[in-house]
Image (tube, helix red, strand yellow):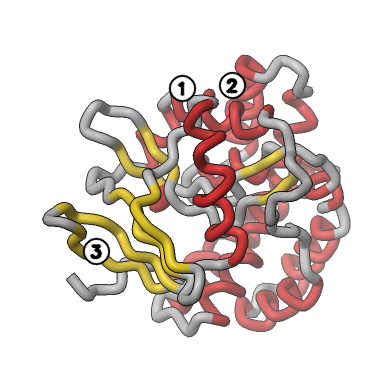
Amino acid sequence: MNEDLAKMGAARVRLASLHGFDCIIKQPVSAVEFQFYHQVAPEFRAAGIAVPELLSRDAATQTLCLEYIPQSISQHELAERDDILAMIARIHRYPVNQSWSLKHHRWCEDKTLNALELLKLPESAAAIVLDIAKLSACLFNPTMLISGDTNAGNWGIRQKGDAVLFDWERFGTGSPAIDLAPLIKGMGNISDFIHFAERYQDVSPQVISSTLAQEIAICKLWIVTEVIDILHTNHKAELDHYLNWYRSHLPSWLKEVQRFIG
């Protein structure tokens, strides 16, 4: 039970046993996630936002012992389930408490330049990346709460079938696009961005779907720079796999997105 289950982050995640029951030990967690499970999670559960139960915590070692949810969810199911989209929308509608520890999200120039150095994209593609990065303020100006990391690997399904979101180290504020973009497989395409924005508008009518679709496209590229930075910083073996995939898919995708948001 000592295998590290973490895929990208710096914290070690392992399956353990507590009083004869399986649980997840995560250590050391960020200040944001430690505080989330202590203060925010009880409020979220009461509001119908499913997060794992906190079994114990240790502030000295920044350790969390959490409910183990063994059943994973596929990318396809994640994208198709309306209950998951509705739960994400509940996160966005929940009032911000200024006393909470929240991650400050932004598009960092140094991460972008480092990603471009590692990716070695054609010059024309790299130029589009830099141009799109200049439009990123729309992702971070909104003050609504976001999970910050809704990818399929951060969800589990309880025995009764309800979906649970269990990674909260990127909990902060921003555009709904930050939580919608990971629901789309790969880099997605314009039709995907429009489709998800329109679905989200159904549960959050105040949103302008055409604007949100463009923000999702911008966010997809921001996520590329974040993923490369996390993998590179944490010396993850998967880095080369991601770089090769991005090199194959980004040049044509960038041209398409540039026309869409231009």
Label 3 amino acid? Answer: Leu
Number of other residues with Cα within 10 Å of mark 1, as a class: few under 14, some 14 to 19, many 20 or more: some
Estimate the x, y position of residue 62 in percent, counting from the top left. Answer: 49, 70
Q: CA distance from mark 1 to mark 2?
A: 9 Å
Q: Which residue is mark 1?
A: 82
Q: Amino acid at mark 2?
A: Arg
Who is closer to the viewer here, 208 or 144?
Answer: 144
Q: Residue at x 37, y 57 (%)?
A: 56
Do the residues under discs 1 and 2 have CB atoms within 8 angstroms? yes
Which is more foreground, mark 2 or mark 3?
3
Which numbered marker is on residue 118?
none
202 sits to left or right of 50: right
Q: Which mark is residue 15?
A: 3
Indicate whether 159 appears above or below 202: below
Residue 108 in view of the camera: yes
> Foreground residue, 162 or 8?
162
Q: Nearer the viewer, mark 1 or mark 2?
A: 1
Place of residue 31 in the rendered image (x, y in percent of width and height, measured from the top left): 60, 65
Earlier in the chain: of badge 1 and badge 3, it is 3
Image position of 10 (left or right of 193) = left
User: Looking at the image, which residue sits at the far left?
Assistant: 20
Kind of residue at badge 1:
Asp
- For the residue carrying disc 2, how many other residues have a C-alpha within 10 Å: few (<14), some (14-19), or many (20+)? some
Mark number for residue 199?
A: 2
Q: Secondary structure at mark 3?
A: strand
Q: Residue at x 39, y 66 (%)?
A: 26
Residue 174's x, y, as percent? 74, 45
